[in-house]
């Protein structure tokens, strides 16, 4: 059984691939969750790891003191059971920290294999008695995303009061969603994608119908109405950073960042930001001024605008428009060529757009993770310069090691920038 490194809220990060995994580790995640092959709720929208990748994923996590959670939380049919058993056995062999499950058959498989079980939000736990039932099988439970903080606090209070313990003999720990995409359906149980595309959201293959604009047609008159450009099924992204102190006071033990289908720089930025915010809660530096800075940083990466979800008891109605509301975007520039460790100089081949002194760079790679860097000076084709163009070799002094084939981007402001 995992012994918590501290009494701080555990920060749980998404890993849709090796770049995102490294970004999560580098920026202070306590745990990561990921899918392998199929049977997870991002079976289509994120890259996912293979069975062959699993030992390396866990090794990277263990080396850095990070917990590893395998997601096995889709609807499971009879023909999936053999694959589920195969994934459970692979998780056991690789020493995965825990599996996140939603199906009772998979729950039993994991328990029989001696694996730690976490209950997915797909189970839709909304009350103490349901939690007590699943305490037979799991040590950590993700509550329904539709609960208010008052309801969350009631459940955590009852866990203490009734001494509700999991198989480990320790009190049940509560996990909640803290940041990222929200679904219009209750705990993600939506059938729109299945009906329209024969592609089931509950099997990890959502086509995101809710994120599109629609016209309403009056059948009698044939008149078409556009609903005032409001995307009334597409919620803004969840963000709890500005009331993270209330989350802590509710007794929440694990805070989950959503986003296995998002880019590694999203993982890097959100993890770094929430890491700083969680640490600030415990060293008494969680202030309004820092919150404003953190929110500005979160706004730089992919988002649909922010709202507080159901936690503060508001009515549903925080709708967004499709696409990202990020205040900056990345533009591909080129690839890594070489790194000179003694001089701490990185060399890149420029394959696309120009890059100049004063601009911001983004470097990503499976081993490198995510690096952001503002160019103070540069060498172009081994000569001092101020701009590098397509075909040039760009050299910059940077302390972080880069690898061949690392991708180089420049960051530019968008229409959402202040």
Image (cartoon, rainbow, N blue to C red):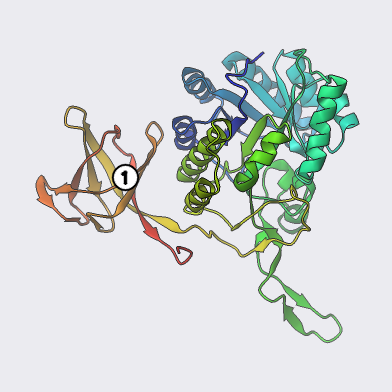
Identify which residue, 207 or 297, lies in the foreground.
Answer: 297
- Residue ID at (47%, 21%): 64
Examine the image and state in which quarter residue 144 appears: top right
Identify which residue, 6 or 95, lies in the foreground.
Answer: 6
Whether residue 36 is visible to the viewer of this picture, yes or no, is no
Residue density around tag 1, few if under 14, some if 14–19, many if 20 or more, within 10 Å: some
Q: Is residue 86 left or right of residue 135?
A: left
- Residue ID at (67%, 13%): 1
Instruction: Using the image, determine if residue 164 lies above or below residue 191.
Output: above
Q: Is residue 339 left or right of residue 250?
A: left
- Residue ID at (34%, 50%): 409
Examine the image and state in which quarter residue 192 appears: bottom right
Q: Secondary structure at mark 1?
A: strand
Q: Position of residue 405 (x, y in %)?
A: 31, 39
Determine which residue is flagged by label 1.
373
Whether residue 90 is visible to the viewer of this picture, yes or no, is yes
Examine the image and state in which quarter residue 314 appears: bottom right
Q: Position of residue 232 (x, y in %)?
A: 72, 65
- Residue ID at (63%, 27%): 70
Work out which residue is located at the far right of the displayed protein and give it.
129
């Amino acid at each position: 059984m995992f012994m918590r490194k501290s009494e701080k809220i555990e920060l749980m990060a998404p890993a849709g691939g090796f770049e995102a995994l490294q970004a999560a580790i580098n920026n202070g995640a306590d745990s990561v969750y990921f899918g392998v092959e199929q049977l997870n709720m991002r079976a289509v929208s994120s890259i996912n790891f293979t069975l062959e990748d699993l030992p390396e994923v866990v090794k990277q996590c263990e080396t850095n003191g990070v917990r590893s959670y395998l997601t096995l939380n889709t609807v499971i049919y009879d023909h999936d059971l053999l694959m589920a058993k195969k994934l459970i056995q692979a998780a056991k062999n690789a020493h995965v920290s825990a599996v996140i499950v939603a199906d009772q058959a998979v729950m039993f498989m994991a328990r029989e294999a001696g694996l730690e079980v976490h209950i997915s939000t797909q189970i839709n736990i909304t009350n103490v008695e349901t939690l007590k039932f699943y305490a037979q099988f799991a040590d950590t439970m993700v509550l329904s995303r539709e609960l208010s903080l008052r309801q969350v606090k009631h459940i955590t209070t009852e866990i203490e009061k009734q001494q509700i313990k999991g198989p480990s003999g320790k009190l049940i720990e509560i996990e909640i969603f803290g940041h990222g995409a929200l679904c219009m359906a209750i705990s993600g149980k939506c059938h729109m994608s299945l009906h329209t595309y024969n592609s089931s959201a509950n099997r990890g293959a959502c086509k995101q119908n809710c994120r599109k604009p629609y016209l309403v047609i009056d059948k009698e008159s044939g008149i078409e109405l556009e609903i005032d450009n409001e995307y009334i099924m597409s919620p803004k992204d969840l963000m709890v950073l500005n009331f993270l102190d209330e989350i802590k006071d509710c007794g929440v033990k694990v805070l989950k960042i959503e986003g296995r289908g998002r880019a590694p720089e999203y993982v890097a930025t959100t993890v770094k930001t929430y890491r700083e915010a969680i640490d600030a809660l415990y060293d008494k530096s969680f202030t309004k001024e820092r919150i404003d800075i953190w929110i500005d940083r979160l706004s730089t990466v992919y988002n649909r605008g922010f709202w507080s979800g159901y936690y503060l008891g508001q009515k549903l109605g925080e709708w967004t428009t499709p696409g990202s509301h990020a205040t900056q975007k990345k533009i591909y520039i080129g690839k890594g060529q070489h790194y000179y460790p003694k001089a701490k100089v990185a060399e890149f081949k420029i394959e696309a757009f120009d890059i100049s002194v004063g601009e911001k760079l983004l470097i990503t790679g499976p081993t490198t993770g995510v690096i952001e860097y503002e160019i103070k000076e540069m060498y172009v084709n081994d000569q001092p310069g101020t701009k590098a163009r397509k075909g040039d070799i760009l050299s910059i002094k940077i302390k972080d090691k880069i690898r061949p084939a690392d991708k180089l981007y420049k960051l530019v402001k968008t229409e959402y920038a202040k």
